[in-house]
Image (spheres, rainbow, N blue to C red):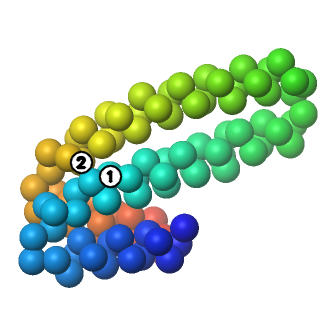
Amino acid sequence: MHQKALAVLARLEESPDPVKHRDELANLVVELTNAGMDYCFIAQLKLANPGFVTQQSANLGMAGALQVLGSVLRSIIGRMDKAQLLSICGSIRHLMR
């Protein structure tokens, strides 16, 4: 995922028209969000071994929440201009350090 993120950021940052890469950036942000929620919550919950029903409830709830969040993120990023997109790229690069 690290290499994929770097590639997306480079394409957007080096493009004469970064707006053409909004969808790609939005997909990356959604993928990073999903991975982060899985790592920070679902994986840790599994380690706690809460039981099958609790685990399945958490999985289902998180999947629904991430689906809604993904739609919102795509909508917001899909309306950003060049400066805003480059700002998002900078924030992602900062988090990758």
Whichever of labels 2 and 1 marks the residue nearer the N terminus, that label is 1
Give the amino acid at mark 1.
Ala
Where 79 falls versus 96 (above or below)? Answer: above
> Visible in this render: residue 83?
no
The residue drawn where x is 16% and y is 63% is 20
> Visible in this render: residue 66?
yes
Q: Is residue 41 left or right of residue 96?
A: right
Q: Number of marks in the image?
A: 2
Give the amino acid at mark 2.
Ile
The residue drawn where x is 43% and y is 48% is 30
Give the quadrant of residue 60: top right
Which image quarter is the N terminus in? Answer: bottom right
Q: Dot 1, how many residues are within 10 Å of its Cα: few (below 14), some (14-19), or many (20+)?
A: many
Q: Where is residue 49 in the image (x, y as percent from the top left)?
A: 90, 33
Q: What residue would you read off at disc 2? A: 77
The reply to whether callout 2 and callout 1 are in contact (CB within 8 Å) is yes
Q: What residue would you read off at disc 1? A: 26
Q: Dot 2, how many residues are within 10 Å of its Cα: few (below 14), some (14-19), or many (20+)?
A: many
Give the quadrant of residue 95: bottom left
Q: What element carries label 2?
A: helix
User: What's the distance in space between the residues labelled 2 and 1, CA to CA?
Assistant: 6 Å
Q: Is residue 19 left or right of residue 13?
A: left
Q: In this view, does 56 lie to the left or right of 97?
A: right
Where 82 falls versus 12 (above or below)? Answer: above
Where 68 falls versus 74 (above or below)? Answer: above
Q: Where is residue 51 in the image (x, y as percent from the top left)?
A: 90, 24
The residue drawn where x is 49% and y is 54% is 32
Give the quadrant of residue 59: top right
Q: Give 93 or 59, whichever is nearer the viewer.
A: 59
Q: Where is residue 14 in the image (x, y as percent from the top left)?
A: 20, 81
